[in-house]
Amino acid sequence: MRTLLISTVLSACVLTAACADGPRSAEAVGEPPFTVSSDIPYMTHDGVPYLLDVYVPANDGPWPVVVAFHGLSSAGKNAGSNTVVVEAAAAQGMLVVAPTWLGGDPFPLTIDDIEQPAPIGNCAVAFAQRQAAALGGDPDHTVVYGFSAGTEPAILAALSPGDEPIPGCEVETPPGPVRGALLGDGEYFLHSESFDGAFNGDLEGMRSQVALRTDPATWDGDPDLEFSIWAAAEGTGARAIDEQPDKTGWLATRDPSGTIRADLERLGRLDDGVVDYVDAAHLLAYRLGAAGIDVTLDILPGGHDTSDKVDELVASLQALASG
């Protein structure tokens, strides 16, 4: 059994909150509100090692566990849009694990790229839960967070965690249930032209991937989990609906049964003739609710960014972790 003892890179004082003079408040002594251990290997996938950072709060635990998935960035886990939320969450008393889950330049996208987030994301969650107790975290209060492309591994970890060990993962147990998921400005392969090539390359495979993110019939996660979804009011990426008599338009390609279109119309989301990130958020929230899953939806001011939304996002994480 492979067990990576990340406690060896953290001081015993941080791990146990038992320094020479007893537990101390970080604020009282002017210490940083968290300690970071960086570049810990948690998985090898297709010969590529994947690394994560662990942010351990300085105040007393047990803390909820947050697994934070970055958006599309060559910086991976160190992307600014990720670290600004991760650091704020750790400062508020959450044990945060930030994995790099996507390596290299993924474009042009293939079905292999599309399928990659599931095992890697689920391994990151399993790793975080396995190590949480030794670090003062509570794995029974695990929340997944994803922004932009990071919503892909987050939603799969919540709704399709699987129950088998993950090849290449540093822990040999599958992930346990998560308590909640915070998803921001995700698309779920719904409308961007960036995904057209993958649909052309493997139509049935891509339709299956869309279903895993949007079709309740494919979900097998804990029905008691909670979702918080947000989208930016001033986001970009709107795509006009192209009506084709032979049903070869991009929306029909993704939605041969027409159920996605019907739900978007039911919600009044096609009245403007386009599909965008806000529409995708409404669709997912509607379907989660219809499946009996607790869900909140917020349309936040600003664009496709997290730096101006940190307070709202951290508050959502705290609510999900304690719910």
Image (spheres, rainbow, N blue to C red):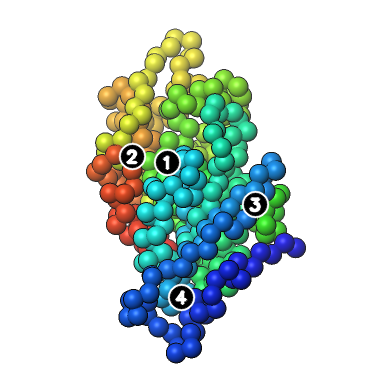
Question: Relative to 148, is 224 above or below?
Answer: below
Disc sitting over residue 148 in the figure: 1
**Could you tell me the amino acid type at mark 3?**
Met
Tell me where residue 203 sits by quadrant. Answer: top right
Distance (Cα) linking label 1 and label 4: 30 Å
- Any part of residue 161 in sight: no
Residue 277 vs residue 211, the one in the foreground: 277
Distance (Cα) linking label 2 and label 4: 33 Å
Distance (Cα) linking label 1 and label 2: 8 Å
- For mark 4, what is the residue? 61
- For mark 3, what is the residue? 43
Residue drawn where x is 56% and y is 61% of the image: 128
Q: Tags 1 and 4 in contact by the CB under 8 Å rule?
A: no
In the rendered image, which quarter contains the N terminus? bottom right
* Residue 21 image point, x, y percent: 44, 90
**Could you tell me the amino acid type at mark 1?**
Ser
Distance (Cα) linking label 3 and label 1: 22 Å
Distance (Cα) linking label 2 and label 3: 29 Å
Q: Residue furthest bottom?
A: 21
Q: Residue furthest top?
A: 245
Number of residues whose C-alpha sits closer than 10 Å to that of mark 2, classed few (under 14), some (14–19) or many (20 or more): many
Q: Tags 1 and 2 in contact by the CB under 8 Å rule?
A: yes
